[in-house]
Image (cartoon, helix red, strand yellow):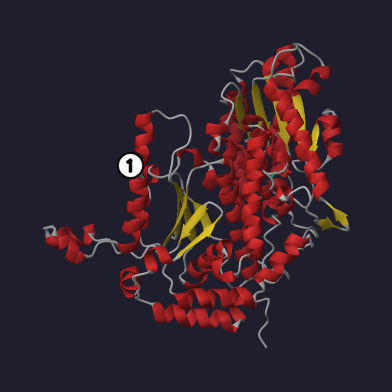
Amino acid sequence: MADRTRPNQLPEWTALAKHREELDGVGLRELFAADPGRGGGYTLQVGDLSVDYSKQLVTDETLRLLRELAAARDVFGLRDAMFRGEKINVTEDRAVLHTALRAPRDAVIEVDGENVVPKVHAVLDKMSGFADRVRSGEWTGHTGKRIKNVVNIGIGGSDLGPAMAYEALRAFTDRSSTVRFVSNVDGADLHEATRDLDPAETLFIIASKTFTTIETITNATSARQWLLSGLGAGQEAVAKHFVALSTNAEKVTEFGIDPDNMFEFWDWVGGRYSYDSAIGLSLMIAVGPDRFREMLDGFHTVDEHFRTAPAESNVPLLLGLLGVWYGNFHGAQSHAVLPYSHYLSKFTAYLQQLDMESNGKSVDRQGMPVAWQTGPVVWGTPGTNGQHAYYQLIHQGTELIPADFVGFARPVGELSESLKAQHDLLMANFFAQTQALAFGKTADEVRAEGVAQELVPHKTFRGDHPTTTILAPELTPSVLGQLVALYEHKVFVQGAIWNIDSFDQWGVELGKVLAKRVEPALTEGADVPGLDTSTQALVAKYRELRKK
Ligand code: F6P
């Protein structure tokens, strides 16, 4: 009997492997020729997102077999357990309920017998009240000056989400204030973020789920020094210039932040799934509570779709399964996400943590080594910049790199008419690229253009590079929420297929422990027992160079 926790032992897996062999050599030109309805037909809609997967190396049969694998792995069963608040994060014995963060006020979602939705809305209301007071100028700094600058100090999930969303929704932000994000423990980060700011007008938001993350606490301590020395004030000034976003009230108080100025969230919100919780406070101050709630509604639209849509039209399921198809049956090791929007400049960096910290695992939920590939390397930057940099490798390199193209029908923001007109050129590139990637250019076509024979191989494009095209009307707060939820659930689907815990992150722990151990060697030249000879030599070199 097959062990149903081992996907590669399932007959559905074997059927896919066989199907993959049968499809070998069948390219997109052929698939389109065989089915005149493919273009436009292979499209699903979720909320405002139209998702076209016609340029994927799949047939109806592929999709059917992939859905059978999902059924065999009971992806929807695990999904339902997540939405019900069951502790599906097995290694940390925690519920996984980022979906509760955007549930409507009257929803009931229980963790350990307690409905968590009222708590979520109480924090959202507290955030809204605070954001309104900062935005209106009612909340002033220690000297009575209006707050004009907000600096979010956090790292990983306590930085990437709000930083990404702030960029994404810049067109909706209050332009009279500045919002900056500091994450790196490299002192240059805080220095550059604060060097031109007036402390009297600056609010620091210390974002840390645990409130023990060394980078964040170090930067927060330095920010406090900067503030107090800049103001020439004592500890009493902190209350007006520091707020905390955390699950750890004790540590927040220990740091000297008034617990009234703490915005809470809970252990059932993973760091990389947290920017729609209190972690989004900087974003809420920037765009205002109404826009923030529109974003939450966008998340919720996709949550409901994922929870209720049948497998055939379930978009996160489809995207997750396509990733499995390429990773496990085509050997693809990376996945590019290529947004055609300047405002989405940090979107792929955000997805890197979401996907790679979730699914970068090599043991299954039972602790057994996996014998199948798990999460891919996720990468990409906004088009068209990428076109003039690394697209060459996607078009003509030796790797198979599935890619998502994300674009919008209308530009947002107060652009001049001529800048608005540039949008068609941007999108012409968007459509041209997926076309070129899918269909390439044959040697015969190149020759027919009169190209010299010796250059023909260089100018030939193999094609058959699979892409998904995600098209939305415009990048509104709701659409951003929809996009993020889509990827959250895609990652979930893949973790469920691979039988891994997508919600822990033990892999980041070892480096943290070793950094603490090695630090005295750097600062005091201390003899660290057990330090390997390579690191010893490097530390010695570092200390020698540092003196100069
Ligand atoms: O080091 C990884 C990590 O735990 C992430 O998962 C998390 O988003 C980040 O560190 C920040 O953690 P915290 O919010 O507790 O400071």
Question: x%, y% of residue 2?
Answer: 66, 85
Residue 453 sits in which quadrant? bottom left
What percent of the width, then of the height, locates residue 59?
A: 43, 74
Coordinates of residue 364 in the picture (x, y in percent): 68, 69
Instruction: Tell me what residue is drawn at x 67 percent, y 51 percent.
Output: 508
> Which residue: 78% across, 13% down?
233
Horizontal side of residue 392 vs 358, given as left or right: left
- Check disc 1 and give the amino acid type: Leu
Q: Is residue 535 above or below residue 283?
A: below
Q: In percent of the image, x 25 and y 61: which residue is there? A: 441
Q: Secondary structure at mark 1?
A: helix
Q: Quadrant of the N terminus?
A: bottom right
Residue at the extreme bottom? 1
Q: Which residue is mark 1?
A: 425
Mark count: 1
Q: Nearer the viewer, residue 209 or 411?
A: 411
Residue toward you, 487 or 254: 487
> Ligand 1: which quarter?
top right
- Residue nearest the viewer, comparing 219 with 167: 167
Give the percent coordinates (x, y) of residue 298: 61, 48
Q: Residue at x 73, y 48 (%)?
A: 101
